[in-house]
Amino acid sequence: MRGSFTYCNPTKLYFGKNALQKLAGELDKYGPNVQLIYGGGSIKKNGIYDEVVEVLKGCGKNVVEDGGVMPNPTVDKLREGVQIARDNDVDLLLAVGGGSCCDYAKAVSVSVKCDDDPWEKYYVRFEEPDCEIIPVGCVLTMVGTGSEMNGGAVITNHETKQKIGHVFGTGVMPKFTVLNPMYTLSLPHYQMVAGIYDIFNHICEQYFSGADDNVSDYLSEGLMRSLIHSSRIANKDPQDYEARSNIMWTATWALNTLLSRAKTTDWMVHMLGQAAGAYTDATHGMTLAAVSLPYYRYLVQSASGEDAGPGGEACIAKFARFAKEVWGVSAEDGNDGQISEVEAAFAGIDAMEAWMKELGLVMNLTELGASEGMVEGIADSTIILKGGYKVLTREEVVEILRQSL
């Protein structure tokens, strides 16, 4: 490991079938007014809402409801939630749902006491909060984003056709999170597999960067292998508690900031997927699935060309390592006992594609509502980052998006 870093994660986790029993002890630490944040109402149908409200009432809390958080929380919804919090002088934001609810709660938390417009301050200027932050707690019902143990908050602005994430510091991370795998068992298959790929790609975004011998890469490979194993079990039997619990725990560790230590990290798949999501409002994990294979193949193809940049050799080596350590494809698996690192790299991507199809993921943006006519606009909304093996040009972004249709 070549980098220097500081690591701190203040989120306290309660994991297991009886994890909600710990909620009362956490609620005692905060004032009487709790803003209960949730999505479209599924928690009322499956009984989780009643369980949580019973605990809140048992602790003497005044519950202010903030429902209707959409899968891709909008800036309009954010402003609505901020007003609810202000009007009721809330002491705690309790998100009950998936990553969108957790993201939204964190965005509200930094905006309630903020005098500026939150979109302009946090998502255009990317400034950090300089105001009081309302504490956030989470009860997770869907896994994928890792939002339960990080400072990320993704918000969509339909007016500007942008979907942008701001990763805040430790002060914005949830103070506590309840993780009961049983709460995830009622998810539709589509949402389950979308979450699984979101987890996988979070690991990839951190793994496909750097050229040093980094502990994080070994951790990433283990997490990916575990996720692949559990995903196959859950895909056949979504009610398998052990598989779903392993998936839930992997999701948390995939993006709780641990794997990124001493790494440059990439995140271009997320930039492409989020830009496409701003145009289509498609499920986040599915947009990632649609753009990731064209992007990774483009990286390897570019790295193997004569005009490959300085990151080319490291790129090929990492994708070949990915093929071997995650998918069991070795550079010694050819008919003559040897294949090149480039061939191994492509074979690893092919193995990932086969697994994605096995799960039933959407493999192109067209199925998600995107069209050729949207490509230029999506490209304009794509933030180009510099942490991966290649810094894309706008023309390359357009080409990758077209390959993703």
Image (cartoon, grey):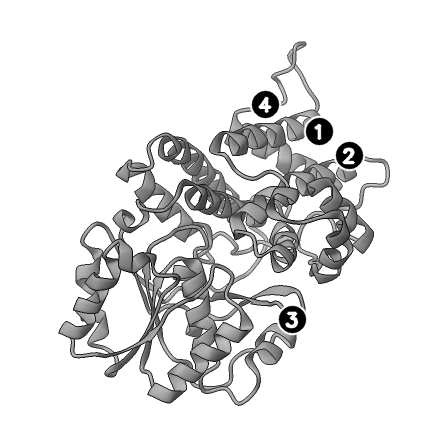
Q: Amino acid at mark 4?
A: Ser
Spatial distance from mark 2 to mark 3, Cα to Cα?
Answer: 40 Å
Q: Amino acid at mark 3?
A: Glu
The vertical placement of 87 against 177, above or below, is below
Task: Say the numbered circle drawn on residue 159.
Answer: 3
Which residue: 67% across, 49% down?
370
Task: Give the mark nearer the N terminus: 1 vs 2.
Answer: 2
Residue 40 is situated, as x and y percent measured from the top left of the image, at 39, 61
Residue 109 is situated, as x and y percent measured from the top left of the image, at 43, 77
Task: Say the numbered circle drawn on residue 332.
Answer: none
Label 2 crowding class (10 Å Cα cut-off): few <14, some 14-19, many 20+? some
Spatial distance from mark 1 to mark 2, Cα to Cα?
Answer: 7 Å
Spatial distance from mark 1 to mark 3, Cα to Cα?
Answer: 43 Å
Q: Which residue is mark 2?
A: 304
Which residue: 50% across, 48% down?
198
Spatial distance from mark 2 to mark 4, Cα to Cα?
Answer: 18 Å
Q: Amino acid at mark 1?
A: Val
Q: Which residue is mark 1?
A: 342
Task: Say the numbered circle drawn on residue 330.
Answer: 4
Residue 276 is situated, as x and y percent measured from the top left of the image, at 65, 54
Label 1 residue SS: helix
Residue 74 is situated, as x and y percent measured from the top left of the image, at 53, 69
Label 4 residue SS: loop
